[in-house]
Amino acid sequence: MDIIVLIKQIPDPEIPPASFKIDAAVNKVVPPSNVAPVMDPYSEHALEAALKLKDANPGSRIKALSMGSGLNKELLKKALALGADELILLDDPAFDNGDSTATSHALALAIKKIGTFDIILTGRQAADWDTGQVGLLLGGALDLPVVSRARKVEAAGGKLRIERVTSYGYEVVEAPIPAVVTVSIELG
């Protein structure tokens, strides 16, 4: 099984709010430059799902994909230390002001270049902007089915079996391979 997991680097959410500044000219939050970023906790849940799939499907490979500007390579190597087989970085200042649509488009182009895969795992949202749109838009850009808010992901018989969080508990759904799955915090 070939797995792509999206990893996002964010400003540390433990930074005191007073440390942030607002650039009124461009209406943008500017995090302090002297604080190291962290791996988005929702991305960590997606990585956990990838590692569980890899354990359950011998011979599987995980490619961790991260996009941004000024990426902290040492931080992102954590994905390799935890069990990802490859780390792909898209690092360019052009990614600085992209919205969810631009981000999903750039990721879709990168994934097409990567080639074959069975599943793309992403956090259900990111802890910095909390929009929860990139995984859904990515599925649309790649013309793939998307299952959101997964609390459990299994692969068998050429299909994915996913427990999806709902307002009333969870539901079990099946999806064909390849697919995009956004992972909820309940998985970790």
Image: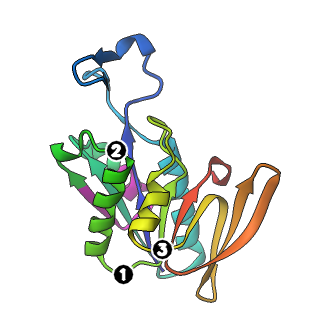
How far apart are the two marked residues, 3 and 2, measured between alpha carbons? 21 Å
Task: Give yes or no for contact between labels 1 and 2 (Cβ–Cβ under 8 Å).
Answer: no
Say what amino acid the circle numbered 1 marks.
Thr
User: In the rendering, at what x and y percent does residue 165 appear?
Assistant: 72, 55
**Residue for point 57% across, 61% down:** 49
Q: Nearer the viewer, residue 56 or 9?
A: 9
Segment tinted magenta in the rendering? 77-89
CB atoms of marks 1 and 3 within 8 Å: no
The numbered mark, 1 or 3, whose residue comes first in the sequence reads 1
Q: Mark 1 and mark 2: span between their CA atoms?
A: 26 Å
Closer to us: 65 or 85: 65
Mark number displayed over residue 144? 3
Q: Residue at x 34, y 44 (%)?
A: 99
Name which quarter of the figure residue 25 lies in: top left
Find numbered disc 1 in the image and state the secondary structure of the residue it sits on: loop
* Residue 30 drawn above or below residue 71: above
Horizontal side, residue 126 vs residue 148: left or right: left
* Residue on which the image places disc 2: 99
Q: Pointer 1: what residue?
A: 116
**Local SS, label 2:** loop
Residue 78 image offset from top left, x and y in percent: 38, 50
Amino acid type, residue under disc 3 in the picture: Leu
Of the numbered discs 3 and 2, the one sitting upstream in the chain is: 2
- Residue at point 16% right, 43% down? 93
- Image coords of residue 45 (percent x, y): 55, 52
State the SS at label 3: loop
